[in-house]
Image (cartoon, coloured by chain):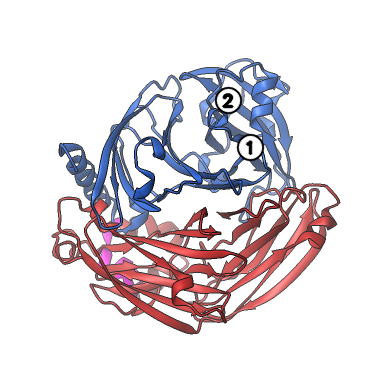
Amino acid sequence: MSLLKGPTNYSILHLASTPIAIMAKQGLRTFAGVTGDDPSNTRNAGTSFVVLVSFFAESNLLGRIIVATVGPCEHYFIDIDQEVAENGWQDIASFCVVHRIPSQYISEDRIVNMPVMHSHEDFSMYRTVVQYAVDSGSMGSVTYETPPNFNRVGGNPSFLSFSNKIYIHPDCDSYLIFLNYSVSPNYTKSADVNIEFYNTTGVCMGRHLISVPALDFSCIRMSDLLPKSSGPFLSFAAVSAGTALLPISIVVNRCLGGVSVEHSHPPQGYLLADWPIVNRIKTEAVNTILGRESC
Amino acid sequence: MLDFLFFKSFFAKSLRPWLRDKLPVSLRRQKNLRKFGSINELYFWRIDGGIDTVAPIQNYFSSLFPSLKTATKGKVWIFDQHGAEITTHEFKLPHQGTHVVRIGELVGCEHFYGTFMWQVCVPEEVARHNLIPSGSVYFTDRGYICYEKNNCQPAFIHGVDRYAVFQGQEMEASSLFYRKSTLAKPWIPEFPVEPNTQIQLDVIILNRTDSKCECSIVLYRNGGEKIYESATNISPRGCSVLSLDGPILRLLENETGYFMVTGLPTTWGRPAIMRHFNSGAISVMHC
Protein backbone atom coordinates (compact mmCIF):
# COMPACT_ATOMS: atom_id res chain seq x y z
CA MET A 1 0.00 0.00 0.00
CA SER A 2 1.42 3.39 -0.96
CA LEU A 3 0.20 6.87 -1.67
CA LEU A 4 0.05 7.86 -5.34
CA LYS A 5 2.40 10.76 -5.92
CA GLY A 6 2.86 13.21 -8.77
CA PRO A 7 0.28 14.60 -11.21
CA THR A 8 -2.92 12.68 -11.92
CA ASN A 9 -4.18 11.92 -15.40
CA TYR A 10 -7.97 11.79 -15.19
CA SER A 11 -8.42 9.89 -18.43
CA ILE A 12 -6.36 7.05 -16.93
CA LEU A 13 -8.26 7.21 -13.65
CA HIS A 14 -11.57 6.54 -15.39
CA LEU A 15 -10.69 3.78 -17.80
CA ALA A 16 -12.25 1.41 -15.27
CA SER A 17 -13.59 2.88 -12.04
CA THR A 18 -16.43 2.63 -9.54
CA PRO A 19 -17.54 5.19 -6.92
CA ILE A 20 -18.51 3.62 -3.61
CA ALA A 21 -20.30 4.84 -0.50
CA ILE A 22 -18.46 3.88 2.68
CA MET A 23 -21.27 2.73 4.98
CA ALA A 24 -19.42 2.48 8.29
CA LYS A 25 -21.73 5.02 9.96
CA GLN A 26 -24.66 2.74 9.11
CA GLY A 27 -22.90 -0.22 10.74
CA LEU A 28 -21.87 -1.92 7.50
CA ARG A 29 -18.43 -3.03 6.38
CA THR A 30 -17.55 -2.08 2.82
CA PHE A 31 -15.65 -4.26 0.35
CA ALA A 32 -14.68 -3.88 -3.30
CA GLY A 33 -14.27 -6.96 -5.51
CA VAL A 34 -11.81 -6.56 -8.37
CA THR A 35 -10.38 -8.72 -11.13
CA GLY A 36 -8.00 -8.45 -14.08
CA ASP A 37 -10.35 -10.49 -16.28
CA ASP A 38 -12.53 -9.06 -18.99
CA PRO A 39 -15.98 -10.42 -18.05
CA SER A 40 -16.80 -11.08 -21.70
CA ASN A 41 -13.52 -13.00 -22.05
CA THR A 42 -12.83 -11.38 -25.43
CA ARG A 43 -10.62 -8.32 -24.79
CA ASN A 44 -7.40 -7.20 -23.12
CA ALA A 45 -5.97 -10.68 -22.69
CA GLY A 46 -3.06 -10.75 -20.28
CA THR A 47 -3.59 -7.21 -18.99
CA SER A 48 -2.86 -6.64 -15.34
CA PHE A 49 -3.99 -3.61 -13.38
CA VAL A 50 -2.86 -1.47 -10.51
CA VAL A 51 -5.77 -1.05 -8.09
CA LEU A 52 -5.91 2.51 -6.89
CA VAL A 53 -8.46 3.77 -4.37
CA SER A 54 -9.26 7.49 -4.07
CA PHE A 55 -10.65 8.42 -0.65
CA PHE A 56 -12.78 11.50 0.03
CA ALA A 57 -14.13 13.29 3.09
CA GLU A 58 -16.61 16.17 2.90
CA SER A 59 -16.04 16.49 -0.86
CA ASN A 60 -12.26 16.75 -0.50
CA LEU A 61 -9.69 14.24 -1.69
CA LEU A 62 -7.85 12.68 1.23
CA GLY A 63 -5.48 10.70 -0.98
CA ARG A 64 -5.14 8.07 -3.66
CA ILE A 65 -3.80 4.78 -2.34
CA ILE A 66 -2.17 2.11 -4.46
CA VAL A 67 -3.68 -0.96 -2.85
CA ALA A 68 -2.50 -3.86 -4.97
CA THR A 69 -2.21 -5.24 -8.45
CA VAL A 70 -4.70 -7.62 -10.00
CA GLY A 71 -3.96 -9.77 -13.01
CA PRO A 72 -5.82 -12.15 -15.29
CA CYS A 73 -7.41 -15.10 -13.47
CA GLU A 74 -7.33 -13.18 -10.19
CA HIS A 75 -10.41 -12.04 -8.29
CA TYR A 76 -10.38 -10.73 -4.75
CA PHE A 77 -12.05 -8.36 -2.33
CA ILE A 78 -10.40 -5.24 -0.96
CA ASP A 79 -11.42 -4.39 2.60
CA ILE A 80 -12.18 -0.69 2.22
CA ASP A 81 -12.56 -0.10 5.98
CA GLN A 82 -9.16 -1.63 6.60
CA GLU A 83 -7.56 0.67 4.01
CA VAL A 84 -9.30 3.63 5.63
CA ALA A 85 -8.11 2.62 9.10
CA GLU A 86 -4.53 2.06 7.98
CA ASN A 87 -4.46 5.65 6.81
CA GLY A 88 -6.11 7.00 9.96
CA TRP A 89 -9.15 8.26 8.08
CA GLN A 90 -11.78 6.15 9.85
CA ASP A 91 -13.49 9.16 11.43
CA ILE A 92 -13.72 11.19 8.25
CA ALA A 93 -13.65 9.11 5.05
CA SER A 94 -17.15 8.69 3.60
CA PHE A 95 -16.65 8.06 -0.08
CA CYS A 96 -14.14 6.32 -2.30
CA VAL A 97 -13.52 5.41 -5.91
CA VAL A 98 -11.87 2.16 -6.92
CA HIS A 99 -9.80 2.56 -10.10
CA ARG A 100 -8.16 -0.15 -12.14
CA ILE A 101 -5.29 1.23 -14.18
CA PRO A 102 -3.43 -0.90 -16.72
CA SER A 103 -0.05 -1.54 -15.13
CA GLN A 104 1.87 0.04 -18.01
CA TYR A 105 0.62 3.47 -16.92
CA ILE A 106 2.01 3.32 -13.38
CA SER A 107 5.59 2.99 -12.27
CA GLU A 108 6.09 2.47 -8.53
CA ASP A 109 4.07 5.29 -6.98
CA ARG A 110 3.54 7.59 -9.98
CA ILE A 111 1.48 7.74 -13.15
CA VAL A 112 3.88 7.46 -16.06
CA ASN A 113 4.02 10.45 -18.37
CA MET A 114 3.15 8.67 -21.61
CA PRO A 115 0.37 8.87 -24.22
CA VAL A 116 -2.82 7.10 -23.14
CA MET A 117 -3.47 4.42 -25.74
CA HIS A 118 -6.78 3.27 -24.24
CA SER A 119 -10.26 4.75 -23.82
CA HIS A 120 -13.11 3.80 -21.50
CA GLU A 121 -14.62 1.84 -24.42
CA ASP A 122 -11.75 -0.65 -24.15
CA PHE A 123 -12.84 -1.40 -20.60
CA SER A 124 -16.62 -1.06 -20.81
CA MET A 125 -18.37 -3.47 -18.42
CA TYR A 126 -15.25 -3.57 -16.24
CA ARG A 127 -17.29 -3.24 -13.08
CA THR A 128 -16.42 -3.52 -9.41
CA VAL A 129 -18.31 -5.76 -7.01
CA VAL A 130 -19.49 -3.49 -4.20
CA GLN A 131 -20.24 -5.51 -1.11
CA TYR A 132 -21.64 -4.53 2.28
CA ALA A 133 -21.48 -6.85 5.27
CA VAL A 134 -22.95 -7.02 8.76
CA ASP A 135 -21.08 -8.27 11.81
CA SER A 136 -22.79 -11.68 11.70
CA GLY A 137 -20.97 -12.37 8.45
CA SER A 138 -23.83 -12.07 5.98
CA MET A 139 -23.31 -9.75 3.07
CA GLY A 140 -24.95 -8.38 -0.03
CA SER A 141 -23.37 -7.16 -3.23
CA VAL A 142 -23.95 -5.35 -6.48
CA THR A 143 -21.75 -4.72 -9.48
CA TYR A 144 -21.47 -1.43 -11.36
CA GLU A 145 -19.05 1.06 -12.87
CA THR A 146 -18.77 4.82 -13.31
CA PRO A 147 -21.01 5.62 -16.29
CA PRO A 148 -19.06 7.04 -19.27
CA ASN A 149 -18.58 10.83 -19.05
CA PHE A 150 -20.44 10.86 -15.76
CA ASN A 151 -21.09 14.49 -14.72
CA ARG A 152 -18.37 15.73 -17.06
CA VAL A 153 -17.93 19.46 -16.37
CA GLY A 154 -19.67 21.50 -19.05
CA GLY A 155 -22.58 19.10 -19.41
CA ASN A 156 -26.04 19.73 -18.01
CA PRO A 157 -27.51 16.32 -17.20
CA SER A 158 -30.79 15.68 -15.49
CA PHE A 159 -31.60 12.85 -13.14
CA LEU A 160 -34.71 10.70 -12.95
CA SER A 161 -34.81 7.45 -11.05
CA PHE A 162 -37.69 5.17 -10.12
CA SER A 163 -36.42 1.56 -10.40
CA ASN A 164 -35.46 0.71 -6.85
CA LYS A 165 -38.12 -0.51 -4.47
CA ILE A 166 -38.25 0.36 -0.81
CA TYR A 167 -38.81 -2.41 1.70
CA ILE A 168 -40.35 -1.47 5.04
CA HIS A 169 -40.35 -4.06 7.80
CA PRO A 170 -39.92 -3.81 11.60
CA ASP A 171 -36.81 -6.05 11.42
CA CYS A 172 -35.17 -4.08 8.63
CA ASP A 173 -33.27 -0.86 8.09
CA SER A 174 -33.95 0.31 4.59
CA TYR A 175 -31.59 2.89 3.08
CA LEU A 176 -31.73 4.86 -0.12
CA ILE A 177 -28.42 6.42 -1.08
CA PHE A 178 -27.38 8.75 -3.88
CA LEU A 179 -23.78 9.04 -5.08
CA ASN A 180 -22.57 12.29 -6.64
CA TYR A 181 -19.34 11.77 -8.57
CA SER A 182 -17.69 13.13 -11.70
CA VAL A 183 -15.00 12.05 -14.14
CA SER A 184 -13.79 15.67 -14.28
CA PRO A 185 -11.17 17.16 -11.95
CA ASN A 186 -12.16 19.94 -9.54
CA TYR A 187 -15.81 18.86 -9.53
CA THR A 188 -17.76 20.78 -6.90
CA LYS A 189 -21.42 20.60 -7.92
CA SER A 190 -23.81 19.47 -5.22
CA ALA A 191 -27.21 18.09 -6.20
CA ASP A 192 -30.67 18.78 -4.80
CA VAL A 193 -32.81 15.68 -5.17
CA ASN A 194 -36.59 15.75 -4.89
CA ILE A 195 -38.09 12.38 -3.99
CA GLU A 196 -41.75 11.40 -4.01
CA PHE A 197 -42.75 8.19 -2.24
CA TYR A 198 -45.77 6.13 -3.28
CA ASN A 199 -47.60 3.22 -1.73
CA THR A 200 -48.93 0.34 -3.82
CA THR A 201 -52.25 2.05 -4.49
CA GLY A 202 -50.44 5.05 -5.98
CA VAL A 203 -51.05 7.36 -3.03
CA CYS A 204 -48.17 9.74 -2.34
CA MET A 205 -46.73 9.04 1.12
CA GLY A 206 -44.60 12.15 1.19
CA ARG A 207 -42.07 14.29 -0.58
CA HIS A 208 -38.51 14.75 0.56
CA LEU A 209 -35.67 17.02 -0.50
CA ILE A 210 -32.09 15.92 0.04
CA SER A 211 -28.83 17.60 -0.89
CA VAL A 212 -25.98 15.42 -2.14
CA PRO A 213 -22.53 17.04 -1.90
CA ALA A 214 -20.02 16.59 -4.70
CA LEU A 215 -17.66 13.61 -4.39
CA ASP A 216 -19.79 12.18 -1.62
CA PHE A 217 -23.10 10.48 -1.02
CA SER A 218 -26.27 11.15 0.95
CA CYS A 219 -28.22 8.48 2.75
CA ILE A 220 -31.88 8.35 3.72
CA ARG A 221 -32.98 5.85 6.34
CA MET A 222 -36.55 5.19 5.31
CA SER A 223 -37.82 4.60 8.84
CA ASP A 224 -36.94 8.24 9.57
CA LEU A 225 -39.40 9.35 6.90
CA LEU A 226 -42.08 6.70 6.53
CA PRO A 227 -44.18 4.83 9.10
CA LYS A 228 -43.33 1.14 9.44
CA SER A 229 -46.96 0.32 8.71
CA SER A 230 -46.67 1.76 5.21
CA GLY A 231 -44.91 -1.21 3.58
CA PRO A 232 -43.60 -3.60 2.89
CA PHE A 233 -43.18 -2.43 -0.73
CA LEU A 234 -43.06 1.22 -1.70
CA SER A 235 -41.89 2.94 -4.84
CA PHE A 236 -40.46 6.37 -5.45
CA ALA A 237 -39.53 8.85 -8.14
CA ALA A 238 -36.40 10.93 -7.58
CA VAL A 239 -35.41 13.88 -9.77
CA SER A 240 -32.65 16.45 -9.94
CA ALA A 241 -31.70 19.09 -12.49
CA GLY A 242 -28.12 19.68 -13.53
CA THR A 243 -26.52 16.63 -11.95
CA ALA A 244 -26.54 12.90 -12.59
CA LEU A 245 -26.52 10.59 -9.60
CA LEU A 246 -26.11 6.90 -8.87
CA PRO A 247 -28.96 5.60 -6.68
CA ILE A 248 -28.48 2.46 -4.62
CA SER A 249 -30.88 0.81 -2.20
CA ILE A 250 -29.65 -1.20 0.75
CA VAL A 251 -31.84 -3.22 3.11
CA VAL A 252 -30.34 -4.68 6.28
CA ASN A 253 -32.27 -7.26 8.25
CA ARG A 254 -30.81 -6.95 11.76
CA CYS A 255 -32.49 -10.14 13.05
CA LEU A 256 -31.47 -12.58 10.32
CA GLY A 257 -28.37 -10.62 9.42
CA GLY A 258 -29.16 -10.25 5.73
CA VAL A 259 -28.06 -7.48 3.40
CA SER A 260 -29.69 -6.58 0.09
CA VAL A 261 -27.91 -4.19 -2.27
CA GLU A 262 -29.10 -3.14 -5.70
CA HIS A 263 -28.62 -0.22 -8.04
CA SER A 264 -30.95 0.99 -10.76
CA HIS A 265 -31.35 1.58 -14.45
CA PRO A 266 -31.61 5.13 -15.73
CA PRO A 267 -34.84 6.03 -17.57
CA GLN A 268 -33.12 5.56 -20.91
CA GLY A 269 -32.89 1.89 -19.93
CA TYR A 270 -36.69 1.80 -20.16
CA LEU A 271 -36.92 3.30 -23.62
CA LEU A 272 -35.90 1.83 -26.94
CA ALA A 273 -36.04 5.03 -28.98
CA ASP A 274 -33.83 7.63 -30.59
CA TRP A 275 -31.92 9.77 -28.10
CA PRO A 276 -33.82 13.04 -28.80
CA ILE A 277 -37.09 11.28 -27.89
CA VAL A 278 -35.59 9.66 -24.82
CA ASN A 279 -34.13 12.95 -23.70
CA ARG A 280 -37.39 14.81 -24.23
CA ILE A 281 -39.43 12.27 -22.26
CA LYS A 282 -36.90 12.33 -19.45
CA THR A 283 -36.56 16.12 -19.38
CA GLU A 284 -40.34 16.67 -19.39
CA ALA A 285 -40.74 14.16 -16.56
CA VAL A 286 -38.04 15.84 -14.48
CA ASN A 287 -39.52 19.30 -15.08
CA THR A 288 -43.04 18.12 -14.26
CA ILE A 289 -42.02 16.53 -10.96
CA LEU A 290 -39.76 19.44 -10.01
CA GLY A 291 -42.43 21.95 -10.94
CA ARG A 292 -45.23 20.70 -8.74
CA GLU A 293 -45.53 21.86 -5.18
CA SER A 294 -46.82 18.57 -3.82
CA CYS A 295 -47.23 15.07 -5.15
CA MET B 1 -32.67 -6.66 -47.94
CA LEU B 2 -32.25 -3.73 -45.55
CA ASP B 3 -31.93 -6.21 -42.72
CA PHE B 4 -29.07 -7.83 -44.58
CA LEU B 5 -27.40 -4.51 -45.38
CA PHE B 6 -27.66 -3.23 -41.82
CA PHE B 7 -26.93 -6.30 -39.76
CA LYS B 8 -24.92 -8.74 -41.83
CA SER B 9 -23.18 -7.27 -44.83
CA PHE B 10 -19.44 -6.90 -45.11
CA PHE B 11 -19.79 -3.14 -44.88
CA ALA B 12 -22.27 -3.20 -42.04
CA LYS B 13 -19.81 -2.36 -39.29
CA SER B 14 -18.35 0.72 -40.88
CA LEU B 15 -21.60 1.87 -42.45
CA ARG B 16 -23.82 1.34 -39.45
CA PRO B 17 -23.28 4.76 -37.82
CA TRP B 18 -23.95 6.46 -41.14
CA LEU B 19 -27.02 4.31 -41.81
CA ARG B 20 -28.27 4.97 -38.32
CA ASP B 21 -28.41 8.67 -39.07
CA LYS B 22 -29.86 8.39 -42.55
CA LEU B 23 -32.50 5.66 -42.31
CA PRO B 24 -35.87 6.12 -40.61
CA VAL B 25 -36.24 4.13 -37.44
CA SER B 26 -38.85 1.88 -39.02
CA LEU B 27 -36.24 0.61 -41.49
CA ARG B 28 -33.13 0.29 -39.36
CA ARG B 29 -34.78 -1.75 -36.60
CA GLN B 30 -35.37 -5.46 -36.72
CA LYS B 31 -38.81 -6.25 -38.13
CA ASN B 32 -40.61 -6.80 -34.85
CA LEU B 33 -39.55 -3.41 -33.43
CA ARG B 34 -40.83 -1.00 -36.05
CA LYS B 35 -44.18 0.10 -34.56
CA PHE B 36 -44.47 0.90 -30.86
CA GLY B 37 -45.13 -1.22 -27.83
CA SER B 38 -43.25 -2.80 -24.98
CA ILE B 39 -40.59 -5.41 -24.39
CA ASN B 40 -40.55 -7.33 -21.15
CA GLU B 41 -37.97 -9.41 -19.32
CA LEU B 42 -37.97 -13.02 -18.16
CA TYR B 43 -37.30 -13.47 -14.44
CA PHE B 44 -36.38 -16.31 -12.12
CA TRP B 45 -38.60 -17.42 -9.26
CA ARG B 46 -38.11 -19.89 -6.45
CA ILE B 47 -40.29 -20.91 -3.53
CA ASP B 48 -38.06 -23.27 -1.59
CA GLY B 49 -36.05 -23.19 1.62
CA GLY B 50 -38.20 -20.49 3.21
CA ILE B 51 -37.78 -18.22 0.19
CA ASP B 52 -40.70 -16.69 -1.67
CA THR B 53 -40.36 -14.60 -4.79
CA VAL B 54 -42.15 -11.28 -4.82
CA ALA B 55 -42.56 -9.08 -7.87
CA PRO B 56 -43.51 -5.51 -6.98
CA ILE B 57 -44.77 -4.63 -10.47
CA GLN B 58 -44.54 -0.87 -10.74
CA ASN B 59 -46.47 1.36 -13.11
CA TYR B 60 -43.25 2.81 -14.51
CA PHE B 61 -45.23 4.80 -17.07
CA SER B 62 -46.30 7.13 -14.23
CA SER B 63 -42.70 8.21 -13.61
CA LEU B 64 -41.90 8.60 -17.31
CA PHE B 65 -45.14 10.54 -17.96
CA PRO B 66 -46.09 12.15 -14.63
CA SER B 67 -48.47 14.64 -16.28
CA LEU B 68 -50.54 11.93 -18.01
CA LYS B 69 -53.21 9.60 -16.66
CA THR B 70 -51.36 6.29 -16.66
CA ALA B 71 -53.72 3.86 -14.91
CA THR B 72 -53.51 0.62 -16.83
CA LYS B 73 -53.74 -3.16 -16.58
CA GLY B 74 -51.25 -5.98 -16.51
CA LYS B 75 -50.78 -9.73 -16.70
CA VAL B 76 -48.31 -12.19 -15.21
CA TRP B 77 -47.31 -15.52 -16.75
CA ILE B 78 -45.61 -18.14 -14.58
CA PHE B 79 -43.63 -21.03 -16.08
CA ASP B 80 -41.88 -24.04 -14.62
CA GLN B 81 -38.14 -24.61 -14.97
CA HIS B 82 -38.74 -26.22 -18.36
CA GLY B 83 -40.66 -23.22 -19.68
CA ALA B 84 -44.12 -24.81 -19.47
CA GLU B 85 -46.87 -22.43 -18.38
CA ILE B 86 -48.18 -23.07 -14.87
CA THR B 87 -50.64 -20.22 -14.45
CA THR B 88 -51.46 -16.63 -15.35
CA HIS B 89 -52.74 -13.72 -13.32
CA GLU B 90 -54.31 -10.44 -14.43
CA PHE B 91 -54.41 -7.20 -12.49
CA LYS B 92 -55.19 -3.50 -12.60
CA LEU B 93 -52.45 -0.96 -12.00
CA PRO B 94 -53.29 2.54 -10.74
CA HIS B 95 -51.35 5.66 -11.67
CA GLN B 96 -48.14 5.55 -9.60
CA GLY B 97 -49.27 2.19 -8.24
CA THR B 98 -47.49 -1.11 -7.70
CA HIS B 99 -49.08 -4.55 -7.94
CA VAL B 100 -47.38 -6.98 -5.59
CA VAL B 101 -47.30 -10.56 -6.89
CA ARG B 102 -46.23 -13.30 -4.49
CA ILE B 103 -45.35 -16.33 -6.57
CA GLY B 104 -45.93 -18.65 -3.60
CA GLU B 105 -49.61 -17.65 -3.62
CA LEU B 106 -50.02 -18.56 -7.31
CA VAL B 107 -47.93 -21.70 -7.68
CA GLY B 108 -48.58 -25.07 -6.08
CA CYS B 109 -46.08 -26.65 -3.73
CA GLU B 110 -45.16 -29.28 -6.35
CA HIS B 111 -43.04 -26.61 -8.04
CA PHE B 112 -39.83 -25.19 -6.57
CA TYR B 113 -38.47 -22.84 -9.20
CA GLY B 114 -39.03 -21.58 -12.70
CA THR B 115 -39.39 -18.41 -14.73
CA PHE B 116 -42.04 -15.72 -15.03
CA MET B 117 -42.76 -12.57 -16.94
CA TRP B 118 -45.28 -9.78 -16.89
CA GLN B 119 -46.72 -7.24 -19.23
CA VAL B 120 -47.86 -3.77 -18.19
CA CYS B 121 -50.10 -2.46 -20.95
CA VAL B 122 -49.06 0.88 -22.46
CA PRO B 123 -51.62 3.30 -20.93
CA GLU B 124 -54.13 4.94 -23.27
CA GLU B 125 -52.79 8.49 -22.92
CA VAL B 126 -49.21 7.27 -23.43
CA ALA B 127 -50.22 5.32 -26.55
CA ARG B 128 -51.80 8.51 -27.90
CA HIS B 129 -48.79 10.71 -26.99
CA ASN B 130 -47.45 12.30 -30.16
CA LEU B 131 -43.90 10.97 -29.60
CA ILE B 132 -44.74 7.33 -29.05
CA PRO B 133 -46.18 5.83 -32.25
CA SER B 134 -44.35 8.30 -34.49
CA GLY B 135 -41.04 7.63 -32.75
CA SER B 136 -41.52 3.85 -32.76
CA VAL B 137 -40.93 3.85 -29.03
CA TYR B 138 -40.73 0.50 -27.26
CA PHE B 139 -40.87 0.53 -23.47
CA THR B 140 -38.46 -1.92 -21.91
CA ASP B 141 -39.52 -2.77 -18.38
CA ARG B 142 -36.56 -3.32 -16.05
CA GLY B 143 -38.41 -4.94 -13.21
CA TYR B 144 -37.24 -5.31 -9.64
CA ILE B 145 -37.60 -8.73 -8.10
CA CYS B 146 -37.45 -9.54 -4.40
CA TYR B 147 -36.45 -12.92 -3.02
CA GLU B 148 -37.87 -12.80 0.49
CA LYS B 149 -36.54 -15.15 3.17
CA ASN B 150 -38.82 -16.00 6.10
CA ASN B 151 -41.22 -13.19 5.14
CA CYS B 152 -38.80 -10.59 6.47
CA GLN B 153 -35.43 -10.59 4.73
CA PRO B 154 -35.44 -9.22 1.20
CA ALA B 155 -32.84 -9.65 -1.52
CA PHE B 156 -33.50 -7.46 -4.55
CA ILE B 157 -32.32 -7.87 -8.11
CA HIS B 158 -33.28 -6.13 -11.33
CA GLY B 159 -33.79 -7.47 -14.83
CA VAL B 160 -30.78 -7.59 -17.15
CA ASP B 161 -32.07 -8.62 -20.57
CA ARG B 162 -35.11 -8.59 -22.85
CA TYR B 163 -37.51 -11.37 -23.66
CA ALA B 164 -40.95 -10.91 -25.31
CA VAL B 165 -42.18 -8.13 -27.60
CA PHE B 166 -45.72 -6.77 -27.28
CA GLN B 167 -46.99 -4.58 -30.08
CA GLY B 168 -49.00 -1.46 -29.29
CA GLN B 169 -51.31 -2.07 -26.32
CA GLU B 170 -51.68 -5.78 -26.92
CA MET B 171 -51.62 -8.14 -23.95
CA GLU B 172 -50.21 -11.14 -25.78
CA ALA B 173 -46.62 -11.27 -27.01
CA SER B 174 -46.15 -11.20 -30.77
CA SER B 175 -42.54 -12.40 -30.88
CA LEU B 176 -39.40 -12.86 -28.89
CA PHE B 177 -36.87 -10.03 -28.70
CA TYR B 178 -34.16 -12.50 -29.78
CA ARG B 179 -35.69 -13.76 -33.00
CA LYS B 180 -32.65 -15.71 -34.09
CA SER B 181 -30.17 -17.65 -32.05
CA THR B 182 -26.91 -15.84 -31.41
CA LEU B 183 -23.49 -17.28 -30.83
CA ALA B 184 -23.29 -18.78 -27.35
CA LYS B 185 -21.23 -16.56 -25.07
CA PRO B 186 -19.07 -17.02 -22.00
CA TRP B 187 -19.15 -14.72 -18.99
CA ILE B 188 -16.61 -14.39 -16.21
CA PRO B 189 -18.35 -12.57 -13.37
CA GLU B 190 -16.15 -10.15 -11.44
CA PHE B 191 -17.37 -11.76 -8.23
CA PRO B 192 -14.56 -13.30 -6.13
CA VAL B 193 -15.64 -16.67 -4.71
CA GLU B 194 -14.45 -16.85 -1.11
CA PRO B 195 -15.21 -20.37 0.09
CA ASN B 196 -15.87 -19.54 3.73
CA THR B 197 -18.18 -16.56 3.43
CA GLN B 198 -21.31 -18.45 2.37
CA ILE B 199 -22.51 -22.02 2.74
CA GLN B 200 -23.88 -22.25 -0.79
CA LEU B 201 -23.76 -20.21 -3.93
CA ASP B 202 -26.42 -20.75 -6.61
CA VAL B 203 -25.69 -19.64 -10.15
CA ILE B 204 -28.96 -18.96 -11.97
CA ILE B 205 -29.17 -19.02 -15.77
CA LEU B 206 -32.24 -18.32 -17.93
CA ASN B 207 -32.87 -19.14 -21.56
CA ARG B 208 -34.59 -16.23 -23.34
CA THR B 209 -34.62 -17.88 -26.77
CA ASP B 210 -36.89 -20.41 -28.47
CA SER B 211 -34.13 -23.03 -28.71
CA LYS B 212 -32.67 -25.34 -26.10
CA CYS B 213 -29.25 -24.26 -24.87
CA GLU B 214 -26.41 -26.00 -23.07
CA CYS B 215 -24.59 -24.00 -20.43
CA SER B 216 -21.79 -24.90 -18.09
CA ILE B 217 -20.16 -23.49 -15.00
CA VAL B 218 -16.45 -23.85 -14.35
CA LEU B 219 -14.98 -23.01 -10.96
CA TYR B 220 -11.35 -21.90 -10.85
CA ARG B 221 -8.87 -21.23 -8.13
CA ASN B 222 -7.16 -17.83 -8.51
CA GLY B 223 -4.37 -18.34 -11.01
CA GLY B 224 -6.59 -20.26 -13.41
CA GLU B 225 -6.56 -23.84 -12.09
CA LYS B 226 -9.88 -25.50 -12.97
CA ILE B 227 -11.28 -27.37 -9.97
CA TYR B 228 -14.92 -28.10 -10.81
CA GLU B 229 -17.19 -28.15 -13.84
CA SER B 230 -20.87 -28.84 -14.35
CA ALA B 231 -23.15 -28.56 -17.38
CA THR B 232 -26.89 -28.22 -17.87
CA ASN B 233 -29.44 -28.14 -20.67
CA ILE B 234 -31.99 -25.34 -20.45
CA SER B 235 -35.31 -25.43 -22.29
CA PRO B 236 -36.66 -22.38 -24.09
CA ARG B 237 -38.16 -20.00 -21.48
CA GLY B 238 -36.70 -22.26 -18.82
CA CYS B 239 -33.96 -21.88 -16.25
CA SER B 240 -31.31 -23.79 -14.39
CA VAL B 241 -29.74 -23.47 -10.96
CA LEU B 242 -26.13 -24.63 -10.76
CA SER B 243 -25.20 -24.83 -7.11
CA LEU B 244 -21.74 -24.53 -5.64
CA ASP B 245 -22.41 -26.07 -2.24
CA GLY B 246 -20.13 -26.71 0.73
CA PRO B 247 -18.19 -29.72 -0.66
CA ILE B 248 -17.59 -27.94 -3.98
CA LEU B 249 -16.56 -24.66 -2.33
CA ARG B 250 -14.15 -26.60 -0.10
CA LEU B 251 -12.27 -27.63 -3.26
CA LEU B 252 -10.92 -24.08 -3.20
CA GLU B 253 -9.02 -25.06 -0.02
CA ASN B 254 -9.51 -21.67 1.65
CA GLU B 255 -8.24 -19.81 -1.38
CA THR B 256 -10.25 -17.29 -3.34
CA GLY B 257 -11.47 -18.27 -6.77
CA TYR B 258 -13.90 -17.32 -9.47
CA PHE B 259 -16.15 -18.95 -12.02
CA MET B 260 -16.99 -18.78 -15.68
CA VAL B 261 -20.32 -19.59 -17.31
CA THR B 262 -20.33 -20.73 -20.92
CA GLY B 263 -23.10 -21.17 -23.46
CA LEU B 264 -25.13 -18.06 -22.58
CA PRO B 265 -27.71 -17.84 -25.37
CA THR B 266 -28.47 -14.10 -25.42
CA THR B 267 -26.46 -10.90 -25.50
CA TRP B 268 -27.20 -9.61 -22.02
CA GLY B 269 -28.52 -12.73 -20.35
CA ARG B 270 -25.80 -12.89 -17.77
CA PRO B 271 -26.19 -15.19 -14.76
CA ALA B 272 -27.34 -14.19 -11.30
CA ILE B 273 -25.80 -15.35 -8.05
CA MET B 274 -27.79 -16.24 -4.96
CA ARG B 275 -25.80 -16.75 -1.77
CA HIS B 276 -26.96 -18.62 1.33
CA PHE B 277 -25.34 -17.71 4.64
CA ASN B 278 -24.92 -19.51 7.95
CA SER B 279 -27.33 -17.12 9.63
CA GLY B 280 -30.08 -18.22 7.24
CA ALA B 281 -29.88 -14.97 5.31
CA ILE B 282 -29.65 -14.82 1.53
CA SER B 283 -28.35 -12.29 -0.95
CA VAL B 284 -28.64 -12.03 -4.69
CA MET B 285 -26.65 -10.25 -7.38
CA HIS B 286 -26.80 -10.10 -11.14
CA CYS B 287 -23.49 -10.51 -12.91
Q: Earlier in the sequence, mark 2 or mark 1?
A: 1
Residue B242 lies, with reference to residue B96, above or below; the image says: below
Q: Is residue A140 magenta?
A: no
Residue A170 lies, with reference to residue A80, above or below; the image says: below
Q: Which chain is blue?
A: A
Give the prevailing secondary structure in the magenta stretch: helix
The amino acid beneath tag 1 is Phe
Q: Secondary structure at mark 2?
A: strand
Q: Which residues are magenta?
A: B21-33
Q: Position of residue B26 (x, y in %)?
A: 26, 68
Chain B on-screen colour: red
Q: In the rendered view of the protein, which quadrant contains the C terminus of chain A? A: top left
Q: Position of residue B233 (x, y in %)?
A: 65, 78
**Residue found at x 58% / y 25%:** A54
Residue picked out by circle 1: A31
**Residue found at x 61% / y 20%:** A90
Q: Position of residue B271 (x, y in %)?
A: 59, 62
Kindly identify which chain the residue marked by label 2 belongs to: A
Whether residue A38 sits left or right of residue A223 in the image: it is right
Using the rendered view, name the quadrant where residue A106 is placed. top right
How many residues crowd around disc 2 within 10 Å: few (fewer than 14), some, or many (20 or more)? Answer: some
Kindly identify which chain the residue marked by label 1 belongs to: A
**Residue found at x 18% / y 64%:** B134
Number of the label disc, if any, that sits on residue A54: 2
The amino acid beneath tag 2 is Ser
